Image (cartoon, grey):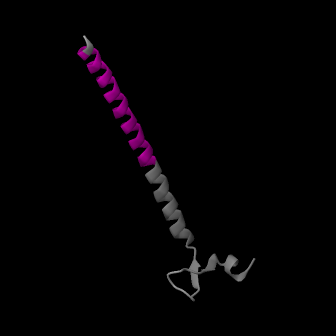
Amino acid sequence: MSFFDERDMAAITSPDFPGERLIVCRNRDLAREREDLIKATERDLAKLGVAVLATVLDNMEIGATAGGFLSE
């Protein structure tokens, strides 16, 4: 391991800062918080997906029923 690996740090370069080296540090507490937010968002999106699918299926059923009335 290098010095940076032991401290969750890394040196990176960016075209936005030519000729400069940027030092970044991983914040484990912030990473956990973000993971929790991502999981909560995924749960909410799954619920939304179920609701949207139910609406689409309902609309298809309504359309099929209406189509039956129109063809009579």
Q: Is residue 55 above or below residue 24?
A: above
In the image, what residue occupies the spot 26% across and 14% down? Answer: 71
Q: Residue furthest top?
A: 72
Q: Is residue 25 left or right of residue 46?
A: right
Return the residue nearer the eye: 2 or 20. Answer: 20
In the image, what residue occupies the spot 39% across and 35% down? Answer: 53
Q: Is residue 9 above or below residue 35?
A: below
Q: Quadrant of residue 52?
A: top left
Return the residue nearer the eye: 4 or 72. Answer: 72
Q: Is residue 68 above or below residue 28?
A: above
Q: Is residue 8 left or right of residue 63?
A: right
Residue 54 covered by magenta stretch: yes
Residue 72 picture location, percent across and down? 24, 10
Residue 33 picture location, percent across and down? 49, 64
Majority secondary structure in the magenta region: helix
Residue 50 covered by magenta stretch: yes
Residue 1 picture location, percent across and down? 75, 76
Q: Residue furthest bottom?
A: 19
Span shown in magenta:
43-70
Q: Is residue 64 left or right of residue 1?
A: left
Return the residue nearer the eye: 26 or 71. Answer: 71
Residue 9 picture location, percent across and down? 62, 78
Q: Quadrant of residue 56?
A: top left
In the image, what residue occupies the spot 70% across and 82% down? Answer: 3
